[in-house]
Amino acid sequence: MVENKTVRLDRVIVRFAGDSGDGMQLTGDRFTWESAANGNDLSTLPDFPAEIRAPQGTLPGVSAFQIHFAAHDIFTPGDSPDVLVAMNPAALMASLPLLKPGAEIIVNTDEFTKRNLTKIGLTASPLDDGTLANFSVHPVGLTSLTVEALAGFDLGKKDAERAKNMFALGLLSWLYHRDLAATENFLGEKFARKPEILKANIAALHAGYNYGDTTEDFVVRYEVAPAPMPTGTYRNISGNLALSYGLITAARQAGIPLFLGSYPITPASDILHELSRHKNFNVTTFQAEDEIAGIGAALGAAYGGALGVTTTSGPGLALKSETIGLAVALEVPLLVVDVQRGGPSTGLPTKTEQADLLQALYGRNGESPVAVIAPKSPADCFDAAIEAARIAITYRTPVLLLSDGYLANGQEPWRIPDLDTVPAIDPAFADGPNGEDGEFLPFLRDPHTLARPWAIPGTPGLAHRIGGIEKADRTGNISYDPDNHDTMVRLRQAKIDGIDVPDLEVDDPTGDAELLVIGWGSTFGPITAGVRRVRKEGKKVAQAHLRHLSPMPRNTGEVLRSYRKVLVPEMNLGQLALLLRGRYLVDAVGFNQVRGLPFNAPQMQDVINEMLEEVR
Amino acid sequence: MTEIPLKAKDFKSDQEVRWCPGCGDYAILAAVQSFLPELGRTPDDIVFVSGIGCSSRFPYYLSTYGLHSIHGRAPAIATGLSVTRPDLDVWVVTGDGDALSIGGNHLIHALRRNVDMTILLFNNRIYGLTKGQYSPTSEPGKITKSTPAGSVDRPFNPVSLALGAEATFVARTIDSDRGHLIDVLRAAAEHEGTALVEIYQNCNIFNDGAFDLVKNPQSRDEALIRLVAGEPITFGDRRVVRDADGHLQVADAGEPVVHDPTDLELAFALSRLSGSELDHTPIGIFRQVSEPTYDAGVQQQVDDSATEADLRALLTGPDPWAVS
Ligand code: SF4
């Protein structure tokens, strides 16, 4: 037994990297839960290939999971990892450029065979040729140690080797003083029907932990204290899960059934999977024959009085355009969730991007305005879903919710809301005639919201006919009248423009910054982290973040015009910047990157500093 | 709730009907309006969903709830409505272009799922609303504006297609045969699951006389085969028999095949008796079987999810922690 000393750290970034089949996502996920249970603030970034089993041992086949956990609040999954767990040569080489100088590398030496090295074009092993000179390397035979630890089990070699990720998790858990109980419970559920595999995984987990305890290779252990957070009950949550829960909660607050019509697509499918498990909340899920049928069925359900939702990613949104247009014309509540990924076309299915903004706003024929909202963090997907439902139902309109791959799969701690504080949503179904002569006018609008009645089939006396053809104001009858069309186009736009959205809040601590950084969606984390770093340097910078992209908050122009410079970082080629420039006549400057990865804090810090140079 | 039985006029809307004079759609509309009172429901409990095309204007002319949607998508929209509102009587009105071309995918999937709705497919074998291009049911070699040298593609047979998707109710009828049309509508409306009714409909502007062979008194006895469950399949002085290999054949003599709408293979063979030339055209109910509906299956799962809906517990999850 070695006496290890424990070093207290403020924050740590760990990256697990291995082959697609090595279970790195699961390992990272479990380590995330342990960090959450430890009270750390955290942010994660799964980074995996689109192929289910990409060629083994190759660079494109590397699947990684990065977690940033800290004793204070953090906003990004971190830039340069402090610790790398590399399961094979490809994982090591793919991750090496990312690492901090001096980073610790726990590397599975068993996989550094000639064959595996050749697969990535190496002739000498990076373990021996000085490649890792600037790092602190812990060579561990993860595979062989796992197989050894499981010698007494009734398992094939393959199954035994497969538990090596639990060995690695055990070792990391030891390194950071983590409790194994929660992971044991998790494994217990996962392998409930495979008792031998369950025992083996738990044994591997403990073997990894004990290895840390006994080997002399690790002289220090680390501790990251819990982050101070507002009081409450917390859990860990990913964006797709938070979004699913938000949808269930919204339907419940409206007292109507939830209907999801969807077609499987990465990275949105998990919402379909999740909702399909909660039928007891009056949830119906429909796996449609295609994207168009997914939204079509959702529209049919909405017409019938349900909260109709469809979930997709960019290519699917393209296919749904015509039906969104129909929902604009019919003026029925409809929620369209686009979990954005790299495009165009199939693009980068498992990588993040936010280049569907203009598609969401304008990607339809005719003047076809919709409400658009974007969550800013994984946990915020819960609130954004409820807000989207509120707008859809109140204003009888399609609402596009723009999440992205980073939010969908990334996790963070979430303070579970008190349900009593979530406001009710009134579906306000029409229940009788609204015309002066006792007739029903399906397009007579509420003077305040401009919303039309939601008169669902089965309501006595309100039977009416509507469709995608232009309708006469008030009566909803077919109308080809030029003036009426002009009126209706303007009314539909005015309805969206008049949606009640909160003012844009600006974070400008001294009140006299000259540069405003404004973003939307998932860039909130990195922008906030970058702004913090710049302020720590003693400089002034203001920050604002748009949740509502359509309509934009009423004070947006005023806010933009009160700064000398406006910087808009986006994971696209400048879509929000285009809107801000066009709409508010401000010289908004974009910072744009489309690498399939979120921005990181140092990058934001640099960009802000460059802009501040210009302000001088 | 209406006490007095409703009449056809109670199902007419106040909208002016805008089909071309002489269009077969008028006869279908009149037949549907006169049949709807039989459902014993008020117009408020009935929904007609349509796509795009001449036939898809249908809902505007009924006093029921009506949704005139987009091209080809009516079955998908009606699926969402039917599944969430089992209390409603859901109908789809579509055409050969709408259902078999742009919306082919939705049609076959609605049929295979057996969603509880009745689909009326008006087949005029032409595109009417876009002014006369050939359709997926047009006969090969059709000369139209878009095919001046004749169409090259082979047509769909809607009944064969529906049977291929294992639709649980498949029938064919004709716009001008009001009695037959209403009989088929009645059976279709009673059917639980997706009922597909192909209605031969004359487009007198762009494809006039497309079904004359089976309509004209001079020719129809030789061409039209009326299917009646449990009865020998005979027409004129001819009959449908099985040859030595068991294949169906039209013959002058021999033991006629007895129609059995529960026999999928027979139904399919009957649908193949003639190609697009219509020389031996069965009408009536090809297939009628009782299978679980999609709607009921979905509802069953909701009913079976007996666990109490505790939202707080769901949000909290298995591993919460407290910060105090
Ligand atoms: S174009 Fe043909 S199908 Fe259309 S309304 Fe006129 S006659 Fe009827």
Image: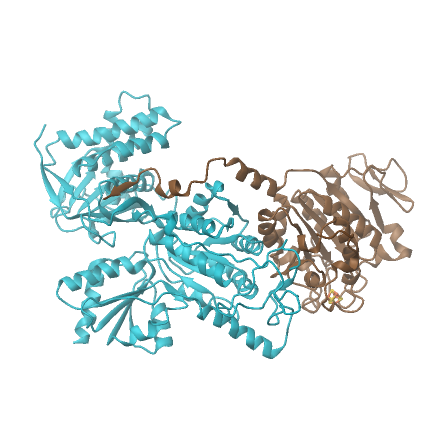
Chain colours: A cyan, B brown
Q: How many marks?
A: 0
Quadrant holding the C terminus of chain A: bottom left
Q: From the top left corner, tell me how far across and down residue A153 is, in percent.
A: 30, 21
Foreground pick, A362 / B99: A362
| Residue A278 locus on image (x, y percent) | 46, 42
Of B278 and A471, the residue lying toward us: A471
Is A169 displayed left or right of B101 in the figure? Answer: left
Looking at the image, residue A332 lies above or below residue A142 = below
Residue A379 vs B12, above or below: the answer is: above
Which residue is found at the position 27% from the left and 20% from the top? A152
Residue A469: image quadrant is bottom right
Task: Answer whether residue B270 is visible to the viewer in this image.
Answer: yes
Q: Quadrant of residue B203?
A: bottom right
Quadrant, the N terminus of chain A: top left
Residue at image point 56% right, 52% down: A301
Asked if residue A130 is positioned above or below residue A526 in the image, the reply reads above
Is residue A154 left or right of A214 when viewed as pictured? right
Residue visible at 33% across and 71% down?
A577
With A427 as the anchor, is A419 left or right in this view? Answer: left
x then y, percent, for residue B133 = 69, 66
Q: Quick check: can you spot residue A346?
A: no
In this rendered view, identify the residue nearer to me: A4 or B219.
Answer: A4
| In this picture, residue A51 sits left or right of residue B214 | left
Q: Quadrant of ligand 1?
A: bottom right
Name the spot of residue A443 as percent of width and height, x first: 59, 67
